[in-house]
Amino acid sequence: MTQFSTFLRSIGLTGQFLLLAAILFTGLAVLTGKLQNQVIAGRMVEGSLEIEQALARGVLIAALGNEAVRGPLSAETQRRVQEAVTGQIDPAYIDRVKLWDLHGALVYNSRGAVEHQGRPEPAVLRALHGETVIVEADGSTPENLWDGALGTVVYEVYIPLVNRDGQVIAVGEIYCSVELLLARISRMLEDTDAIRLGSLVLGIVGLAVLVAFAQRRITAQEAALGESLRKADALALANQRLFQESEELRRQAGQISEAVLNRIGSDLHDGPIQLLSIAALYRSQLAHAEADSPIAAKASDLLDQAIAELRVISTGLVLPTLEGLDVGQTVRRAVENFRTEFDSEVRVDIGPIRAFPDDEMRTAIYRVVCEALHNAQAHAGGQGLAVTAEEGNGILRIAVSDRGPGLGGEEAAEGDHVALGLAGMRNRARSIGADLRLTSRPGRGTEVALLIDLDQLENNPRPDAGEGPADRMHSPAASGSDALHALRGKG
């Protein structure tokens, strides 16, 4: 069995298929050939017997005439029957002929004496009722016991002999030897088997050629497919490396941007703001007459306004401490700083949120909420400000809305500032793989929604219980405006 398995593996898939096809087709051909030969031989024997009995019926009826046979034949009738049998019937096919009268008694035997049979043969009685009976001859029956050797394959055919009036006048019995017929049938079937075998061999050879051609095509296609898969794998690895590099560069750019913004805010606070504050101190040393002049008063107002706006810009650039805050606390921190800066009422609705953000995502959430609140304050006058955060359908949704005139109203005259702020928020959203959607209709307010896939938040580790965000809620925080908004002053 092991050797056969080894042989099957050695010939390959094509050889296995051809071997199986050859065995299957050969087995089917042999089986169907035998069945077909048996059917053909049987049908040819039946046809031959039909011909022989038709010939014998005509010969015997012509010799007997129209009168019914009741008892022994007359010498004249027996002579006519004998001459007809010996002269018109070929002994190579019809070995002997018998006649039975209407009482079932034997009255003529072409190959021997007429013996008393006793009780009539059942086949003779059936033939007397008009039935043609064909049975294979049996040398051990009383009828054939005294007739000598019958031959290898002999059939007894009992023929009802019917006169012109349609009446059965006697029963003729012929012994048909089919040995010669079977020999001819055997030769014919051998020729047929040879043709069938040749056709089978040609079919298998043709199938082998077809399978070999198909196997060659399949092998070539498999090689091409394998090469394509290897190229695709290499391209996928290269794309993965590029994606990882781009993600790393994006993170570095975000970190550098925040560092630059914090540095600019600190520099503004420690540089121009300090210098302007010193200038304000020197202003108090001016003489009262000079200080009360309109020019001095105007200069003093401009100086105070410059100091205030620079302080807003510097605090907007500096990012407050967000480390360890969850989503809700990050959103509330942005809202608290906005309330402190503008003394505006903001409705906050934060549902249960299980997801926990990383530092990069916290920064993006804080910046987007701050920028959206500042835009709503600037262009909607702080009307109906609301901030919501909730989870649903695998998405974290953080929305900032107002009840102002919408972006199509007069309050949107500074469209460039709005577009710049929206571009900044969209860039923030894209930096964390989120989506930013703006909904605004004239007279019905505006909503800015940040949509984050929760799958991005599932694997972020939470801080230890002892170092939770509640311990850092009172750390100093700056204004919540984004860098772009802070730089333009009144965005």
Image: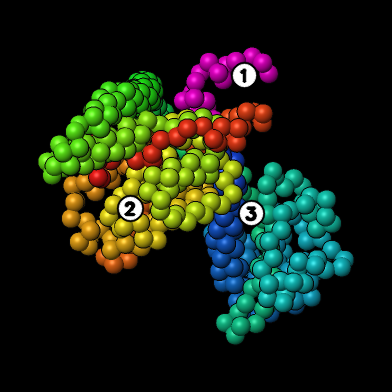
Query: What separation in Å lies between label 2 and label 3 (alpha carbons)?
Result: 122 Å
Q: Is residue 349 above or below residue 310?
A: below
13 or 385, which lies in front? 385
Most extreme residue toward the bottom is: 165
The secondary structure that most of the magenta stretch takes on is: helix
Q: Is residue 17 visible?
A: yes
Name the kind of residue labelled 3 in the image: Cys
Picture quadrant of residue 24 = top right
Picture quadrant of residue 208 = top left
Left or right: where 171 falls relative to 458:
right
Task: Give the x, y percent position of residue 455.
Answer: 51, 39
Residue beneath label 2, please? 377
Q: Secondary structure at mark 2?
A: helix
Task: Give the x, y percent position of residue 335.
Answer: 45, 46
Residue beneath label 3, please? 176
Span shown in magenta: 1-24
| Count of numbered circles in the view | 3
| Residue visible at 78% across and 61% down in the picture | 114
Q: Secondary structure at mark 1?
A: helix
Disc 1 crowd, CA 10 A, few/some/many (<14, 14-19, 20+): few
Residue beneath label 1, please? 5
| Residue visible at 72% across and 77% down in the picture | 129
Task: Give the x, y percent position of residue 32.
Answer: 57, 44
